[in-house]
Amino acid sequence: MNGRKLKLAGASRRLTDQKPVRAWDCLQHGNCVEVWSNDFFLYTALVDERADDGQLIWLIDKSTGSRRLFVRGDPVTLYWI
């Protein structure tokens, strides 16, 4: 499975070839990311908007279309897709 681990129903997986987004200010409208929290995959999202300093970001969940706001201190990690 190309160095990947996947657990169904728990939505926990780790993809070793993915890079976390270290600075949110480098994200642009339309970038696709995976949203994780506490080592659990939540969903795949598109970047909608972000603050110039990268402290706030709006993401659109690709499966539901829900728009969600995150603050840099929130317990989420974004991974480049």
Image (cartoon, helix red, strand yellow):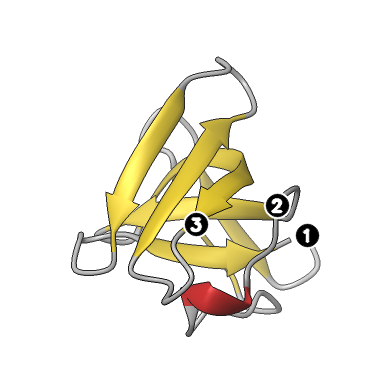
Which of 58 and 38 lies nearest the eye of the viewer? 58
Where residue 39 appears, as percent x and y from the top left, is 33, 61
In terms of sequence position, does the residue under pointer 1 or pointer 3 come before the other? 1
For label 3, count other residues whose C-alpha is less than 10 Å away and answer few (under 14), some (14-19) or many (20+): many
Tell me what residue is drawn at x 70 percent, y 52 percent.
Answer: 29
Which residue is drawn at the image coordinates 80% and 68% (left, top)?
Answer: 2
Q: Earlier in the sequence, mark 3 or mark 2?
A: 2
Q: Which residue is mark 2?
A: 29
> Which residue is situated farthest in the front direction here?
52
Discs 2, 1 touching: Cβ within 8 Å: no
- The residue lying furthest to the right in this view is 2
Which residue carries the number 3 mark?
Answer: 50
> Horizontal and vertical percent for residue 71?
26, 58
Q: Is residue 20 visible?
A: no
- Look at label 3 and name its amino acid: Arg
Question: Who's the residue at 48% across and 20% down the image?
Answer: 66
Q: Nearer the viewer, residue 62 or 59?
A: 59
